[in-house]
Amino acid sequence: MNNKFSKRVKDIMAYSREEAGRLQNNYIGPEHLMLGILRDGDGLAIQILQDFDVNLKFLKEQIDSQIREIQEPQEEENNELVVTKNTEKILKMSILEARLTKSSPTDSEHLLLALLKDKKTLINSIMKSYNVDYSSTLLYVKSIVNNRNDEELDIETDEPITEAHFTDDDDMKGRPSSQRPVGGAPTAKTTSDTPVLDNFGTDITKAASENRLDPVVGRDKEIERLSQILSRRKKNNPVLIGEPGVGKSAIVEGLALRIIQKKVSRILFDKRVIALDMASIVAGTKYRGQFEERIKAILNELSKNPNIILFIDEIHTIVGAGGSSGSLDAANMLKPALARGEIQCVGATTLDEYR
């Protein structure tokens, strides 16, 4: 199984063993794996945490404190460390996560996904305080991982994981055993704060800034009215109603052009208009819960970025979209956030569908 892990993951496993020793623990748990990720200070897992605005130094201090509360330091009678069953499970799950994202070998982001997926771990409860969960992280990884390997991995899930997996190997020779600074030398960050929305939507304001939109003629009154409604404190989610082809989407494009030109109220100066593609969200969700995970991840990004105005063309299609027996459709998932004013939305539909 060890050959299924990248060099970075092997380093992380070795670091986690050292972290357990530093904290005078007689076991290697999932929390030590997380400390290993932080100590490595590089790779996609660190990039994800940074892009989710996680304070890496404070996170390490939190984990240290929680570990000390759970278990008192042990006297070193021998150098043997027990790899917990939960740690074994998470390492095996990380290989499955790599398969899910069509990646090989298993890297730090897959280890992070496995830690977040196990809801019983200390790490899961700590990451909730940062609003980092499995579903949003999975969509993030899927949206930025390149060079996916379509070959199936031969997963030997019955192979036991022992302390030998956590010892230094030849790849570790020449590397300092002292702890590296947390968050040191991260990979280049993505420029977007909304990777999930970028994957399932189109940024109309970005298209306007790049001169990819045609000028809108004869719709000044409608664009002005749309701008007024969006500037309200409450009841600020307008719906454009009209027959097919009359230019409902063009009105939203006209709004985006005005935002770029600063010809709107100051409230809308920094807004981004993103057109959501419901078909791409529903596509590929053959297993129960996948659609809900995608909508939840989108809502999570919208709540963190209040400057986004969501545009849903053919908004009537969200009623029943993704819904199955015993599950919510898109409309019912969006409704609470809209009612609380956490997200802002513009819809477009025909008069018949609106009725």
Image (cartoon, grey):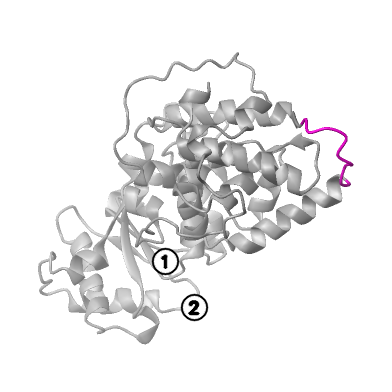
Image point 77% across, 35% down: which residue? Answer: 27
Q: Position of residue 257 (x, y in %)?
A: 20, 74
Q: Is residue 32 magenta?
A: no
Image point 38% across, 19% down: which residue? Answer: 152
Marks 1 and 2, how far apart in space? 10 Å
252 sits to left or right of 37: left
192 sits to left or right of 132: left
Q: Which residues are magenta?
A: 72-80
Which is more toward the observer, 115 or 317?
115
Amino acid type, callout 2: Arg
212 sits to left or right of 199: left
Image point 60% across, 37% down: which residue? Answer: 13
Q: Position of residue 305 (x, y in %)?
A: 46, 66
Q: Is residue 189 above or below residue 321?
A: below
Secondary structure category for the residue under label 1: loop
Whether residue 22 can be seen here? yes
- Residue at image mark 1: 237
Label 1 packing within 10 angstroms: few (<14), some (14-19), many (20+) = many
Image point 41% across, 39% down: which residue? Answer: 321
Q: Position of residue 346 (x, y in %)?
A: 35, 63
Q: Quadrant of residue 204?
A: bottom left
- Residue at image mark 2: 233
128 sits to left or right of 207: right
